[in-house]
Amino acid sequence: MSEQRSKDEHTAAIRTDRKIAVVVNTHSRRGRRRFPEVLRLLDAKGLEPMAVHAVVNPKRLRQTLESALALGPDLLIVGGGDGTLSTAVKHLAQRDVALGVLPLGTTNNFARSLGLPLDLPGAAEVFRTGKVADVDVGMAGDRPFANLASFGVSVEVASRVRPWLKRLVGRAAYPLTALAVLPRYRPFRAYITVDGRRHELLTHQLNVANGRFHGGRQVARDMSIDDGTLVAYQLGSGKLLRLLLETMVRAVSGRWRSLAGGPFVVGGEMLLETDPPMAAEVDGEVRLRTPLTLRTVPNGLRVMVPAAFEDR
């Protein structure tokens, strides 16, 4: 972990020195189409980057991020969806560099959790008038994550959702794909241990959230990406009909109750075991398996946010 300035000092450096680097994922059609607009917006706001990288091959994203960071920017602006931003979070966690977000994805969960405007002009304005804040980073084993670790049917949904469907209907592509997968998916038992207490449940789907949003919808109205806790919640019980109904309601309304009244397990660290052992989807990547320890690193990431963001 590098030695960090105060957040006020960091904000002042960005506004005066303007040491900024930009990385935009142009592999997706949206990123490729809007890349020229990104450059025009930054120029119009008087922001002259030290370097601008357009990533055409996603396999080069990690290398490109490291190349940009090697220039020593105070602010690294990253344009892309949640997968791109999750990769950026892994590189910036606990470093003295702020992440600036240009939301170019389907659901933009991370940008929503930060209270950022979802339009590019509004997001770019934050780089000029916003402030540096620090927010939590989730850890699944030794892997940092920004938004969500998921277990169950979502792993299959993530592998089956079609790019053309995402382009056609946006974030609704995920619940629509889930409705096609669910009828033949079997429930599993999950055991979550938090502060010495073991919670047992039977479900088709379990999520452990660091951010406030999933699928573009708010998980709970009193959650925060800056409160030092993770929130585990299931979709449905072991009964398929209940899960189908909850999936449809969530796709239409996105309404959840308060953490105090909803189906949530909350803690700074939790041990998750499943029967049978299962793959974990961590911010879109399927690389880990249960049993798995998940925890937060409070204030583990510096981000550029609107001045009104409540930084705890």
Image (spheres, helix red, strand yellow):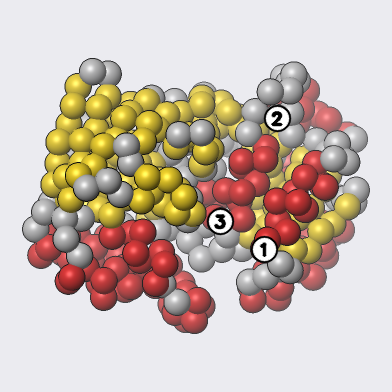
Q: Residue 21: percent from the left, percent from the top?
A: 82, 48
Reading the chain from its start, which is encountered first: label 1 or label 3?
1
Reading the chain from its start, which is encountered first: label 3 or label 2?
3
Q: Residue 71: percent from the left, percent from the top?
A: 88, 41
Amino acid at dot 2: Arg
Give how far apart the Cα atoms at labels 1 and 3 are.
10 Å
Amino acid at dot 3: Gly
Quadrant of the frame with the N terminus: top right
Give the mark toward the camera: 2 or 1: 1
Question: Disc 2 marks which residue?
Answer: 95
Q: Is residue 132 left or right of residue 109?
A: right
Q: Is residue 109 left or right of residue 198?
A: right
Reading the chain from its start, which is encountered first: label 2 or label 1?
1
Q: Nearer the viewer, residue 56 or 7?
A: 56
Give how far apart the Cα atoms at labels 2 and 1 are.
23 Å
Label of residue 67 in the image:
none
Residue at x 27% of width, y 24% of height: 194
Mark 3: secondary structure = helix
Mark 1: secondary structure = helix
